[in-house]
Image (tube, helix red, strand yellow):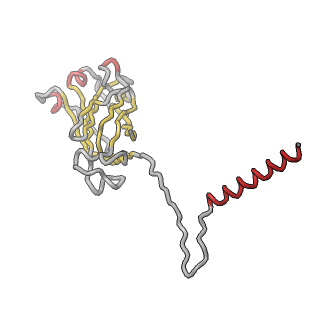
Amino acid sequence: MEIHMIKKIIMGVGAMALMTAGAYAQDSTFGATSTDTVNITAEVAPVVRVSGLDDVDFQLNAAFFNQSGPNTYKNQMFCVYSNVSNAGSFSISATGTPAPAFGSNAWAVTNSGDGSILAFTMKVTDSSLDRVVGPGDNWSGFSAAQWNGDRPDTGDCSDTGDNARLQVTFSKDDVLGANAGTYAGSVTLVASAI
């Protein structure tokens, strides 16, 4: 009885091996012509790239103190490449030194002489979506195609032109409350594929 069972198992395994070999065989037959097919797949990962940002220098001097406006700001265009959808969707957050005493959206630069801080705010726009980016913020809904109508197909926006704007702002009240000196620091913009 056991020998009979072993024969059935061996025959079953042999039949399965033949069926499996036949199911995966793709070789063509011999003839005057012969063809074979190869299937190709490629998976493109979602990626983003921020480029083109320049350092910003403010001269907060007598001319600034005498101006009528409450703030001073500088704008600069930069590039965000995103291959997420035709719109080039991405989100924006930032890292740096927060200045919570000046509000939840405030960042700090530090006086090299006495270690005191001066607060500033930062805003990013894609011409449609306009967001103040403070510590802990992560704003979605930005589009790499919004500014120029086309999503860039190059990593540096050389085909469409820059497609996002950064605005850095200092409040006159905050500057009036600060000690004289040179303040420095940095904020890192983080674009994420969403």
Depth check: give the residue in front, 21 or 162.
21
Q: Position of residue 53 (x, y in %)?
A: 32, 45
Depth check: give the residue in front, 26 or 41.
26
Q: Tell me if residue 32 comes above or below residue 115 in the rendering.
A: below
Across the whole image, how many numbered discs are drawn on residues? 0
Residue 189 is situated, as x and y percent measured from the top left of the image, at 36, 37
Quarter holding residue 68: top left
Q: Left or right? Give the position of 66 relative to 86.
A: left
Closer to us: 77 or 81: 81
Tell me which corner region of the image, top left, top right, bottom left or bottom right, holds residue 28. bottom right
The image quadrant of residue 114 is: top left
Q: Quadrant of the N terminus?
A: top right
- What residue is drawn where x is 28% and y is 26%? 180
- Taking the view exactly as shown, the residue that stands out farthest to the bottom is 32
Describe residue 58's horizontal placement relative to residue 94 as left or right.
Answer: left
20, above or below 3, in the image: below
Q: Quadrant of the C terminus?
A: top left
Q: Locate residue 79, reporting x and y percent.
A: 31, 47
